[in-house]
Image (spheres, coloured by chain):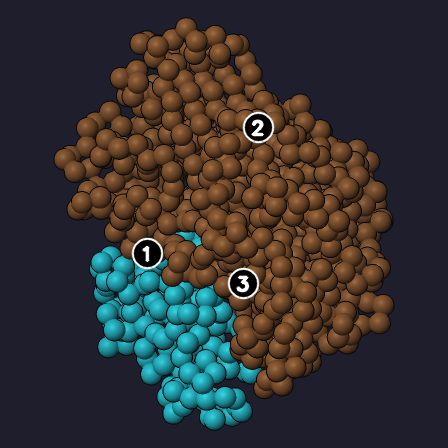
Amino acid sequence: MAEKANKNNKKKGKWTRRAFMLTGGVIGGGLLVGIGGNMYVNKKIKEYTGTGFGDGSSLNAWIRIAADNTITLAVPRSEMGQGVYTSVPMLIAEELEVDMKSVKVIHPQAESPYANTQLVAGSPRDVHSGFNIMEKVASFLPVVATGGSTTITDGFDNLRIVGATAREALIQAAADKWNVGTDDCYAESAFVHNKKTKEKISYGALAEAASAIEIKGIPTLKKQKDFKILGKPVQRLDIPEKVTGAAQFGLDARPDNMLFAAIKHASYHDGKINSISNQTDIEKMAGVKKVILLPEGIGAVVVADNTWRAKNAALALDFEEEGNDTLSSEEIAKLQEETIANNIIATPLDKGNVDEVFENSDQVIEAKYNVPYLAHACMEPINCTVLVDNDKAEAWVGHQGTSLVVNAINQATGVKKANIKTNITYLGGGFGRRAEIDMVLNAAHVANEMKGTPIQLVYTREEAMRHEMYRPAVASNFKAVVNKDGTIEAWENKMALQSVFYSSIMRIMPAMAEPPEKDPTSIEGAANLPYDIKNNRVAFGQLDLPIQVGNWRSVGSSQNAFFTESFIDECAQAADQDPYEFRKNKIQTKPRFLAVLNKVAEMSNWKTPLPEGKYRGIALHESFGSIVAQVAEISTQGENEFKIDNVYCVIDCGRIVNPDTIEAQMQSGIVFGLSAALYGEITFANGEVEQYNFPQYDMVRMNVAPVVKVHIMEVDEYPGGVGEPGTPPIAPALTNAIFAATGKRVRSLPLMKHGYKFV
Amino acid sequence: MELKINGKTHSVEVEPGMPLLWVIRDELNMTGTKYGCGVSACGSCTVMIDGVATRTCTFPASAAEGKEIKTIEGIAAAGQLSAVQKAWIQHQVPQCGYCQSGMIMAAESLLDQNPNPTDEDINKSMTNICRCGTYQRIRAAIHTAAKMRAEQSGLQG
């Protein structure tokens, strides 16, 4: 099996076509922080060539103001529910001195000023500073993309500078007009006011003159106490059209003469279709226009006059195909054990001498944990619409990476990048899946075969679930020695998994790939624990399997928080200490962690015993620059049956942009993590995924969703992300509560598999 | 066949077994109603047929002939958002927003039948999936919409 898997994987090197992505879970040392000023502002005012960016004069690549004072802001990040179509304008509007109500948002083309340097260079997570992969990527190309909870961490200073620079240009334009100094003017609610004469001129009337003014240097930014917008709950700009059905998602694109297409992938992962046995029959089906075998036989597409006909015809396709038809979840579990025993490839953390402690102790505790593959299961099934016409192309797609869409169309069709227009729609969920480019490559290939006709390619729910880039299955084996006073003398964590980073970079840009041992995502949330641990080793081995793995909301932390925060509870148990007190004693020198943990204990009345039949568990985890602690409170309903009554959630994400969005993202991340903890499991048998649709891969619904109470710490530090950090702690908080209830330690997910029910 | 949607009659030529969802989306280009699973498991495709919330991805279009079909595009009367829609904005419910058309239709139908639902009533009737996990805010918005509706009917009565 292992040999077969290896052979399959080698093929991947040639698979430039089935390429790649770039999103969450990257690293580094803050290489480009502070680049702001010039790159973002001065030069780009002149260089901007964007199209479809409202009427009026551009003050820079982000801001256009029309004569009637309509203010259009470019938001080059993708709105997938996390609120960036509101938080990005908030950052600009604060300094520009305009009201949020007067702001309109457009998604611009993929152009260099919009590059997400934080995403590429890495979030401020110092534990990985030894790696340089993303720094290499960052220097290579400007990636306009959304992921890794980086919109605010990338934009917090830069976007305020964007707004402030434009404001200064508008003030200068007014001062020139009045023939006064800029000190005699101030900006407020989209007008420049003359302090002496009390006259005012609208931004709209000043925009043309202001667009010719170059502001040198970086203007002084407002102090936090003067903020009018930032830190206040702001109504989201995208919500009104999301309650009327008017909001446009990728699947809602309806360019003239569009045809509908559905894909059927090769059955086996990394398999190949040699031929379609019943192509002639399929072509005769009602409404079918064309059947196309995709390059390298990765799948086939049926083009028809509506989705219903296309998907029925695609379902009826018969393939003559080859691939790994023996792969099974049991074999993968066996391989994980072998890998941990014999094939550790990297030890990113090895402090002190754990072996010596283990040798000299008769109190070594050991535990083996594992989690399964997970699908993203975005509500909007995966899709992409592409038109190729002569030497031009246009795409309509909800995607996390505007520039990745352009690259993929160029790669699939040969159309020059400058001739490719993107229409980035709302994303019906992203979670990392919509940073992949397979849907773009496939749609572009079909559109290129049918030039002049826009093609909307959809993956049915079944195709989307059975053929994607999963969160990897991971095994994590722990050993520890805990002293009677609760000191963790030694801690060892050996993991086996497929490298998310390697798998995804091989799909997007194989030339940039580094070997899996350099993968930072494998150990994120495992090697950067906040706790005082005297001797500490974290190591991992790599599984070579024909399964594509990718970034799944919170990436490495999605599994590592479950592993480490459960095993910390086991250590507390070994020392016969309260789980909260045990953690608290180990973060005395980390004031931000301590404050978050204490606050969640206070909110949940941790020190007050619960009434009979109610239990609680606690977890603390840092990811994407933010610290989150959660307490899950459950009540017994019957034999192995629980209700999750409340989740108390405290986040320290540094300075606050939109508190309502932070609360929403905590609630969201928790439900997302709960769906995985309770039900989520993608399994393999005979080389195929066994789950097809929601009946086999269920989600938390209204009846199971807990009441989530969120507290946001007020901390004057640079902002961290909020889209992902809510997810990691919920699984261990819940399983620690189940331990409190049952005395049984849950060491693998999902809980459904162990017979636990939730009502 | 002829379908009456949001008060307007549409004539379409499709197979009788074609699910109503695809007629609405692909033949009539009314894209507010969403495709989520195709097996009536998620509720993204919910519309009201003769006042009853119905998952249309498995509901044959022919079975909707002669009935009153109401979609998300049809619930704001004369440009006025419904109480449910207003409550959805007040509570800032949607995140990605993809499931929300179906959620709103299910909530409208619930409140038509049960003007003052308890949490338990909401649990039983709101079984749609929201991958962003907006359930807590949906619950709060339904309670608010129930109050708004009661106030409106009080004013009218």
Residue A368 tag number: none
> Disc 2 marks which amino acid?
Asn
Graded by Cα atoms within 10 Å as few (under 14), some (14 to 19) or many (20 or more), the crowding at tag 3 reads many
Residue A73 or A600: which is nearer the viewer? A600
Same chain for marks 1 and 3?
Answer: yes
User: The residue marked by circle 2 belongs to what chain?
Assistant: A
Residue lying at 65% horizontally and 24% vertically, measured from the top left? A129
Quarter residue A402 falls in: bottom right
Mark positioned earlier in the residue sequence (3 or 2): 2
Same chain for marks 1 and 2?
Answer: yes
Q: Colour of chain B?
A: cyan
Distance CA(mark 3)–CA(mark 2): 34 Å
> Disc 3 marks which amino acid?
Glu
Distance CA(mark 1)–CA(mark 2): 44 Å
Distance CA(mark 1)–CA(mark 3): 26 Å
The residue that disc 1 covers is A702
The residue that disc 2 covers is A343
User: The residue marked by circle 1 belongs to what chain?
Assistant: A
Asked which secondary structure carries label 1, the reply is loop
Mark positioned earlier in the residue sequence (1 or 2): 2
Graded by Cα atoms within 10 Å as few (under 14), some (14 to 19) or many (20 or more), the crowding at tag 2 reads some
The residue that disc 3 covers is A463
Residue A359 located left or right of residue A131: left
- Where residue A704 appears, as percent x and y from the top left, is 30, 51
Residue A746 or A192: which is nearer the viewer? A746
Q: Is residue A221 visible?
A: no
Name the image quarter holding the N terminus of chain A: top right
- Where residue A668 appears, as percent x and y from the top left, is 43, 48
Quarter residue A512 falls in: top right
Mark positioned earlier in the residue sequence (1 or 3): 3
> Disc 1 marks which amino acid?
Met
The chain drawn brown is chain what? A
